[in-house]
Image (cartoon, rainbow, N blue to C red):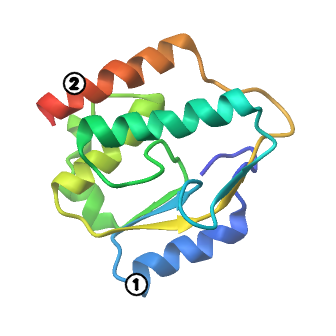
Amino acid sequence: MDADFSHNPADLERLLLACTQYGAQLSIGSRYVKDGNVENWPLERRLMSYFASVYVRIVLGISIRDTTAGFVCYHRSVLEKIELDKVQFLGYAFQIEMKYRAIKKLVPIIEVPITFKDRELGHSKMSVKIFKEAFWGVIKMRRFV
């Protein structure tokens, strides 16, 4: 989860419940499922994030709605299955790759609706370099993961 309180720590319990009581081995705090939301983001940032997830779904052929979400709960077995030493990317591409590797290993996944709130202090690490890595990285993932 983000350390700037963009993610509500109270939602951790719901992510854990998805893994302990509802059959998931990976739960994702999702902004883009029913009852999920984003607060205090400018429209252009909201659109970029949403359409980035659409792009990832199309290129990778996956159904996860919030592919760049960083608010996740992994069962230990998932981290063992996906071979962490083979993960290639950082930043947003890292978030995508972790989910994609879990899907390729047929891990049960549940997206839990959350409300993401933009940070009150500090600034985003989003940059052109990170955006390019994610854009091209998704194409590479399709071929090599």
Residue 84, how many percent across, how many down?
Answer: 26, 44
Label 1, secondary structure: give it.
loop
Judged left or right of residue 48, residue 130 is left
Instruction: State the image coordinates of residue 49 (x, y, percent, origin top left).
Output: 56, 35
- Which residue appears at 20% of the width and 47% of the height? 83
Residue for point 58% across, 76% down: 14
- Would you identify the image quadrant in which residue 132 lies? top left
The relative height of residue 10 versus residue 66 in the rendered view (above or below) is: below
- The amino acid at mark 2 is Lys
Q: Residue furthest bottom?
A: 21
Residue located beneath label 1 in the image:
22
Question: In what quadrant of the picture does the C terminus appear?
Answer: top left
- Asked if residue 135 lies left or right of residue 86, the reply is right
Q: Which mark is residue 120?
A: none
Q: Number of labelled discs?
A: 2
Asked whether, in this view, residue 95 is left or right of residue 58, the answer is: right
Residue 95 falls in image quadrant: top left
Q: Mark 2 falls on what kind of element?
A: helix
| Quarter of the image where one finds residue 86 | top left
Instruction: Relative to 123, say whether 5 is above or below.
Output: below
Taking the spot 13% from the left edge, 30% from the top edge, the residue there is 144
Residue 1, position as x, y percentages in the image? 59, 52
Comparing 96 with 46, the one in front is 46
Q: Residue furthest top?
A: 128
46 shown above or below 131: below
**Where is residue 91 drawn, in percent x and y?**
48, 30
The residue drawn where x is 33% and y is 55% is 63
Amino acid residing under circle 1? Tyr
Q: Earlier in the sequence, mark 1 or mark 2?
A: 1
Q: Spot the residue most to the right.
A: 120
Q: Residues within 10 Å of mark 1 (few under 14, many from 20)?
A: few
Q: What residue did someone put label 2 on?
A: 140
